[in-house]
C-alpha cells in the first residue's frame, strides 16, 4: 500500500470515528453529582499517513495511584472549571503545553468511568472527551509527565497485539488485558476508554477487552 493510500484510509477512519461519536450516547453515572469529577482529553491526529492517539506516561510520584502509568492528559475538576470539557482543556495545557482551541474540534465524548483512588466518599468519575487535532504542535510536559507518546490506532485495533498482565491488588493476583507498545504498558482505565472508542470503530463489536491475552 502506498503512503497516499495509507493517508486516505486514515482520513476515512477519522471521519468514521467522528460520525459514530456523533451518533453515540455515552453512559453517565447516576450519582455523578455527588462524586468528585475528572476529565481527560483523547486527542486523535493523522501523522505520517496513519491515525494516532496522544498518550502520556505519568511521572513516578509517591502517593499517586497512577504513578508511572500510561494515560491521557487530564485531571480533577477545580472550582473554577465550568464543566468537564473545561477540565480536559485546562489539564491538557498544564500537563503537555497544548492549548486546545476552537480549531481543535471536540468531536464527542465517551462514557463516564468510575475510579476509586481512595477509600473515602463515592469515588471519582472520569469523563473522556475526544478531539481531532489537525495542526502540528510542540509539547512542553510539566513535572507530572515523564513522556508524551503518539500511539498508532492501527496497533490498538489489532487484537493480536493484546496481551495479559497480572495486577497485584490487596494480596490478590488478578489477570488484566493490556497492550505493550514499544515497552510501554497500556491497561486499566486508559484501556477501558480505548476499548469503547475502538468498539465504535468496529461497529459495536465488544471484543476489545478480552481476558484471554498473550504473554
Image: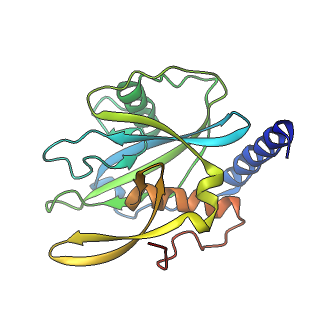
Q: Residue at x 41, y 62 (%)?
A: 29
Residue sitting nearer the eye, 120 or 134 = 134
Asked whether 212 or 88 is in front, the reply is 212
In the depicted structure, whether residue 17 falls above or below residue 25: above
Report whether 131 appears left or right of 123. Answer: right
Residue drawn at point x = 22 percent, y = 52 percent: 65
Q: Identify which residue is drawn at 40% across, 47% down.
A: 71
Point out the image quarter for the C terminus: bottom left
Tally the numbered discs: 0
- Residue 78 spot, x, y in % from top left: 28, 34
Is residue 108 shown left or right of residue 23?
left
List x then y, in percent, for residue 50: 70, 41
Judging from the image, the colouring scheme is rainbow
Can see residue 38?
Answer: yes
Relative to 4, say whether 135 is above or below: above
Task: Tell me: 146 left or right of 111.
Answer: left
Amino acid at each position: 500500500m502506498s503512503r497516499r493510500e495509507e493517508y486516505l484510509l486514515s482520513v476515512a477512519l477519522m471521519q468514521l470515528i467522528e460520525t459514530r461519536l456523533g451518533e453515540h450516547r455515552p453512559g453517565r453515572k447516576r450519582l455523578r453529582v455527588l462524586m468528585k469529577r475528572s476529565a481527560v482529553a483523547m486527542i486523535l491526529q493523522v501523522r505520517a499517513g496513519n491515525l494516532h492517539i496522544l498518550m502520556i506516561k505519568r511521572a513516578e510520584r509517591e502517593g499517586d495511584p497512577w504513578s508511572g502509568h500510561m494515560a491521557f492528559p487530564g485531571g480533577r475538576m477545580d472550582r473554577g472549571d465550568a464543566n468537564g470539557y473545561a477540565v480536559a482543556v485546562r489539564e491538557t495545557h498544564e500537563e503537555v503545553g497544548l492549548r486546545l482551541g476552537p480549531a481543535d474540534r471536540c468531536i464527542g465524548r465517551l462514557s463516564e468511568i468510575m475510579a476509586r483512588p481512595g477509600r473515602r466518599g463515592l469515588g471519582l468519575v472520569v469523563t473522556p472527551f475526544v478531539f481531532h487535532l489537525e495542526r502540528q504542535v510542540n509539547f512542553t510536559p510539566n513535572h507530572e509527565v515523564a513522556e508524551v507518546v503518539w500511539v498508532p490506532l492501527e496497533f490498538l485495533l489489532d487484537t493480536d497485539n493484546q496481551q495479559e498482565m497480572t495486577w497485584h491488588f490487596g494480596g490478590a493476583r488478578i489477570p488484566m488485558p493490556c497492550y505493550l507498545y514499544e515497552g510501554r504498558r497500556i491497561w486499566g482505565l486508559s484501556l477501558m476508554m480505548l476499548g469503547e472508542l475502538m468498539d465504535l470503530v468496529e461497529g459495536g463489536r465488544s471484543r476489545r477487552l478480552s481476558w484471554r491475552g498473550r504473554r
